[in-house]
Image: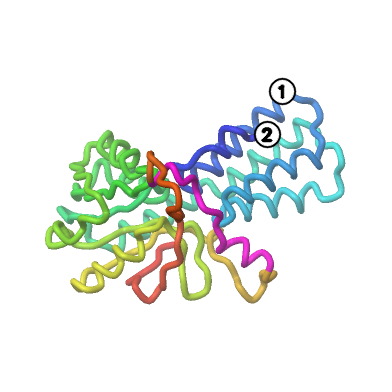
């Protein structure tokens, strides 16, 4: 179950959740009944693969509470649940993006972006007929999903420059501020794609603002969350060695991770 989603290593948490919702809608429309245990096991597999995606945890907890006493879920009931959940939260990203647009002067600004975030892309979707900032998008290795975001924003009509995040020192003088997404907000830290920490350090060093765009579902209350859940949220299994070295050298230990925690003290403002 959810095989295609499990192998997606380039989408952000918003797109992963959207794929899950779409698959559940299709499942509910094509099957009269669904085994609840099987469904929850499939969602748990996604949580194992994407433990740091707070949106998945929120959706999973909401789903399990709703169907807590149900062994067999009616297809139409599943469709209604997913549609209601989507309707309730569909404007969350847009609201955060609108707050950002109303607060920060974007006209002719040069904005640094990292990785691939549906929340960040929402900003540019809303800006299509307004200001025209210039985008400096990192490649975001090793999955290079930044190229996907660069293409999406370019199609909206913006000027886009694609750079490798390791080369940021060559271009930081041209950048006014950075805008990053977040997979979760956790106490005094947030989680995002590896490379974000170093980019924040560079921006802080040059006294340039850094902003984070998220939504309320991504905020984890550490005082109300079980320690076991917290450990899962901030843990990550190593990704395939081959992404870092095509010709694997025997005896070399390869460490490939996608996500890291970054202090919120680096951030000028979080928009929710």
**Which element type, helix, strand or loop, lies under badge 2?**
loop
Q: Choose top left, top right, bottom left or bottom right for residue 84.
A: top right
- Give the class, few, some or many, for how many residues have Cα within 10 Å of label 2's Cα (few <14, many ≥20): few
**Which element type, helix, strand or loop, lies under badge 1?**
helix
- Give the class, few, some or many, for how many residues have Cα within 10 Å of label 1's Cα (few <14, many ≥20): few
Q: For the N terminus, which image quadrant?
A: top right
On the image, the x and y values in percent for residue 257 come to 46, 55
On the image, the x and y values in percent for residue 14 come to 50, 46
State the mark number for residue 30.
1
Residue under the point 38% across and 46% down? 244
Q: For the C terminus, which image quadrant?
A: bottom left
Q: Is residue 61 visible?
A: yes
* Left or right side of 94 for 205: left
Mark 1 or mark 2, earlier in chain: 2
Q: Which residue is mark 2?
A: 1
Q: Is residue 137 above or below residue 208?
A: above
Q: Is residue 195 above or below residue 11?
A: below
Residue 50 falls inside the magenta stretch: no
Numbered-mark total: 2
Magenta-highlighted residues: 228-244
In the rendered structure, are the residues bearing label 1 and label 2 in contact, judged by CB atoms less than 8 Å apart? no
Q: Choose top left, top right, bottom left or bottom right for residue 199.
A: bottom left
On the image, the x and y values in percent for residue 10 come to 44, 42
């Amino acid at each position: 179950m959810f095989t295609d989603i499990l192998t997606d290593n380039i989408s952000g948490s918003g797109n992963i959740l959207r794929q899950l919702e779409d698959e559940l809608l299709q499942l509910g429309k094509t099957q009269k009944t669904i085994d609840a245990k099987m469904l929850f096991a499939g969602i748990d597999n996604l949580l194992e693969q994407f433990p740091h995606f707070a949106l998945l945890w929120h959706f999973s907890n909401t789903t399990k509470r709703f169907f807590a006493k149900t062994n067999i879920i009616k297809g139409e009931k599943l469709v209604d649940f997913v549609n209601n959940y989507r309707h309730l939260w569909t404007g969350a990203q847009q609201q955060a993006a609108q707050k950002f647009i109303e607060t920060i002067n974007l006209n002719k600004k040069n904005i640094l972006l990292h990785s691939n975030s549906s929340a960040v892309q929402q900003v540019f979707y809303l800006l299509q007929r307004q200001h025209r900032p210039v985008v400096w998008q990192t490649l975001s290795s090793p999955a290079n999903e930044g190229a996907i975001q660069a293409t999406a924003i370019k199609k909206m009509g913006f000027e886009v420059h694609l750079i490798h995040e390791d080369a940021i020192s060559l271009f930081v003088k041209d950048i006014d501020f950075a805008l990053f997404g977040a997979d979760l907000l956790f106490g005094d830290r947030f989680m995002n794609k590896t490379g974000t920490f170093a980019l924040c350090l560079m921006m802080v060093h040059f006294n340039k603002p850094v902003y984070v765009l998220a939504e309320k579902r991504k905020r984890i209350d550490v005082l109300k969350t079980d320690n076991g859940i917290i450990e899962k949220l901030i843990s990550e299994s190593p990704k395939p060695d081959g992404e870092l070295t095509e010709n694997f050298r025997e005896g070399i230990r390869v460490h490939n991770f996608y996500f890291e925690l970054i202090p919120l003290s680096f951030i000028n403002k979080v928009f929710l």
